[in-house]
Image: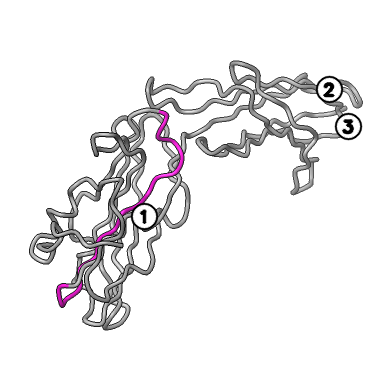
Amino acid sequence: MHHRTAMAGLAGALALTALTIPSAAEADDFSGDIRITKVVVNGGKDIVLGTRAVKTFTIVVTATDDSGIEVGKTFPSMWNTPLPNGDFKGLVFPHDITGKCVRQSFTTTTCTWTLEMNPRIHPQDNTTAGIWTVRALALANDGDYYTKDSAAKAKVLRNATLTVNASPEPVKKNKTVTVTGALRRANWVTYKYGGYAKQPVKLQFKKKGSSTYQTLKTVTTDSTGNLRTTTKATADGYFRYVFAGTSTTAAAVSGADYVDVN
């Protein structure tokens, strides 16, 4: 912990201070007994980006001080990779500087901030997929301030798609069914979807009339993200592929392909 003289004027200019880019070398900076007690990103869910659609999400900041928290003064930002020049690869701020605040008690206030992440702007490239860090600032009514440089972590993941096709349809009982598919994921450089190679994907089957899928086997995608395997036709039902996701890519489930066995 240390105090930075640059923060001395925070009480009068929090909005300007909040919009500066955080330095990777900074530690928590505070004055008095104010504390940031909780930060929740996107309701605790991963932020998943494709190649076009802008993702809207929230950061909810809870802060407490014996004098109370100044409404709207709990500004967050979120970043990924610190660069040698002090900038960041991957950085996003809220559009406004007020937030929607609810006083939980005289001492404690929770503010909800809405942010947007554009896959064609904020990630910059595929290397920023994974863990992002939230920096939060809070200001108390008595002038105390708190800057928490690692207030929370959140995953920003590349969206994935998965397809399935089982054939022939129909098929005779105990004959071979060939199940193909493809695993693709968003590329934040080309803004297209490309094959995700060498990934384990589960082939599952749900018998007609059942509500539960059973895993038949695990299939690995080839060098272009394609899937192909065979299994025996035992009953009418639905085939699907399921991908669990990775540290950079979201999970995906294909649609269901029904096969009539006769």
Provide the residue designation for mark 2: 171
Give me the C-alpha separation between circle 2 and circle 3. Answer: 10 Å
Q: Nearer the viewer, mark 1 or mark 2?
A: 1
Q: Point out which mark residue 12 bears.
A: none
Name the amino acid type tagged 2. Val
Q: Nearer the viewer, mark 1 or mark 3?
A: 1
Of pointers 2 and 3, the one earlier in the residue sequence: 2
Asked which quadrant contains residue 60, the reply is bottom left
Q: Tag 1's secondary structure?
A: strand
Q: Is residue 240 above or below residue 67?
A: above
Provide the residue designation for mark 1: 150
Q: Nearer the viewer, residue 85 or 240?
A: 85
Residue at horizontal 75 percent and vertical 43 percent from the top: 213
Residue 6 position, x and y percent, is 13, 56
Asked which quadrant contains residue 179, the reply is top right
Residue 43 position, x and y percent, is 43, 57
Q: Quadrant of the N terminus?
A: bottom left
Q: Tag 3's secondary structure?
A: loop
Name the amino acid type tagged 1. Ser
How many residues crowd mark 3 within 10 Å: few (<14), some (14–19), many (20+)?
Answer: some
How many residues crowd mark 1 within 10 Å: few (<14), some (14–19), many (20+)?
Answer: some
Give me the C-alpha separation between circle 1 and circle 3. Answer: 54 Å
Residue at horizontal 74 percent and vertical 36 percent from the top: 204
Name the amino acid type tagged 3. Thr
Q: Is residue 4 above or below residue 115?
A: below
Which stretch is magenta?
126-143
Residue 245 position, x and y percent, is 58, 38
Q: Are marks 1 and 2 in contact (CB under 8 Å)?
A: no
Q: Nearer the viewer, residue 85 or 51?
A: 85
Q: Residue furthest right?
A: 174
Answer left or right for 243 relative to 12: right
